[in-house]
Amino acid sequence: MPIEVRRFGVGHRRPEGPPGTTGLTGQVIHSDGRGVVSELAFARGGSVTPHENPSTTWFVVIEGGGWVLVGEERRRVAAGEAVHWPAGIPHAAWTEHGEMRALVVEFAGADDSGTAAVLEGAARRLGPGETGLAARGEGWLAERPVDPERHDRSQGEPA
């Protein structure tokens, strides 16, 4: 089977987003019944207006930075950060003085409880009374000191 390559980025984008969106172009990279992967490019002052959808979504900032809204909470984001947009919760993203590029990964539904798909691989056989559900893990990002010599505020990174 040949390697499949999909082009995206400059020259492949088109206006994108829900009604009311401004200063945004994008390109769907992949779409099927399991979900959608897209690239979005925000111009300065670009915005995706608050909206909700039935999919669980990850907004992965790959360049620049801006702002996101999830429910009532607003937060500044920068390259290297991913934001979870839960299904059915209003969410938005925008830029002010800089540009931002993000990959958007949408999974069908609120979670995987309704799927019957099995990923190829090896699994441990469950014993009597075991459900196979893992406990939710807890964690946090490692501290990331800012090097003033390499920090570029024009890219929208938080101070």
Image: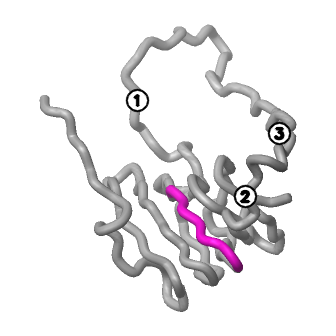
Q: Nearer the viewer, mark 3 or mark 2?
A: 2
Between 57 and 143, the one nearer to me in the picture: 143
Q: Helix, strand or loop at disc 1?
A: loop
Q: Is residue 158 above or below residue 130?
A: below
Q: Helix, strand or loop at disc 3?
A: loop
Give the residue type at disc 3: Arg
Residue bearing mark 2: 152
Query: Are the residues tagged 1 and 2 within 8 Å (C-beta)?
Result: no
Residue 120, x across and y down, in percent: 37, 22
Residue 58 appears in view: no
Point out the image quarter for the N terminus.
top left
Q: Nearer the viewer, mark 1 or mark 2?
A: 2
Residue 64, x across and y down, in percent: 63, 61
| In the image: residue 8, left or right of residue 105 | left
Give the residue type at disc 1: Val
Q: Which numbered circle lies on residue 144?
A: 3
Looking at marks 1 and 2 on the same chain, the residue that comes earlier in the sequence is marked by: 1
Stretch of the chain drawn in magenta: 97-103
Looking at marks 3 and 2 on the same chain, the residue that comes earlier in the sequence is marked by: 3
Query: Are the residues tagged 3 and 2 within 8 Å (C-beta)?
Result: no
Residue positioned most to the front: 149
Residue 104, x across and y down, in percent: 51, 58
